Image (cartoon, grey):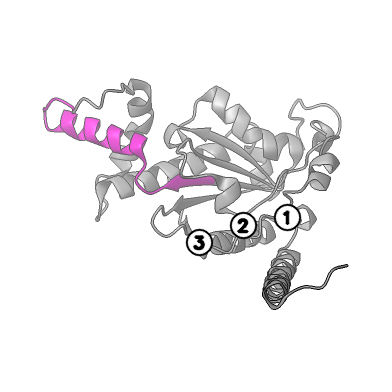
Amino acid sequence: MKSLNVSGNRRKLLTGAAAIGTGSALVLALDACSTDTGGAAASETASAAAEVPDLKDLETAEEIWDALLEGNQRWAAGESAHPDADAETRQELVEGQAPRAAVFTCVDSRVAPELVFDTGVGDIMVTRTAANTFDPLVSESVSYGPAALEAPLLVVLGHQKCGAVTAAHDALAAADAGEEAEDHGYHLPEIVEALTPAYEAAKEESGDPVDAMIAANVALTVQALKEHPNLAELVADGELTVVGAVYSLETGVVTEIEV
């Protein structure tokens, strides 16, 4: 494989008494019952967490993507296991990291990939920009996990009701109609420019135009990343899989889209 100008082992580069009355006895009995119930609940939680696959043990992109989607199902159902969130894991990661997936998503505070996929510290490497738009500097960050740390999966994650996409759509639609764009009080000329290809690609799609533009932007970003100089050879050799998906704020579910 051609050198990516990354020296050394890529994975190591960033490489965690008195008698009691009846009332007191009743209180103690109720407290014991409560303690037992809490202990049972804690035991069930620990058991559920034990069944969660450790991403660090998974090798293929398909296995990792399946595990992320399983984590998302837990999140959507309100049954997150919060794996690898303990002090011991944190200490184990002091000497280096080996994330199994990279995720490129939006800055939206409602879309936190570590929570959405129910992952732990060190499991995924996340890059975030408004509407997951990217330029050469951002693309270097996105490609670092796969190219330097050997993460075999890269996920481009768009999301429902994206403010940046909505603003860009409104501005571009107004321009098409020869009208003045609505003043949102926050100017996004570079983001509007970056999202113009997605706007054009989504014009012929049926359904909600903003939803179509979000999906189109994900698809275009996936394709651009597959062709990135740091990633193209990994994709061609089958060492990296790039998938696109959209997150629903309403349901909490991540849905893979066809790219």
Q: Which residue is mark 1?
A: 55
The residue under the point 82% across, 73% down is 19
Q: Give the Cα separation between the discs numbered 1 and 3.
A: 19 Å
- Element on which disc 1 rests: helix
Q: Which residue is mark 2?
A: 68
- Element on which disc 3 rests: helix
- Local packing at callout 2 (Cα closer than 10 Å; few below 14, some 14-19, many 20+) is many
The type of residue carrying mark 2 is Leu
Q: Give the Cα separation between the discs numbered 2 and 1.
A: 8 Å
Residue 12 highlighted magenta (yes or no): no
43 vs 171, nearest the viewer:
43
218 vs 123, nearest the viewer:
123
- Local packing at callout 1 (Cα closer than 10 Å; few below 14, some 14-19, many 20+) is many
Residue 255: percent from the left, percent from the top?
47, 58
The residue under the point 28% across, 33% down is 167
The type of residue carrying mark 3 is Ala
Q: Which residue is mark 3?
A: 76
Between disc 1 and disc 3, the foreground one is 3
Q: Are marks 1 and 3 in contact (CB under 8 Å)?
A: no
The type of residue carrying mark 1 is Leu
Residue 212: percent from the left, percent from the top?
32, 49
- Element on which disc 2 rests: helix
Q: Quadrant of residue 139?
A: top right
User: Which stretch is magenta?
Assistant: 156-181
Q: Give the Cα separation between the discs numbered 3 and 2.
A: 12 Å
- Say whether residue 43 is left or right of residue 112: right
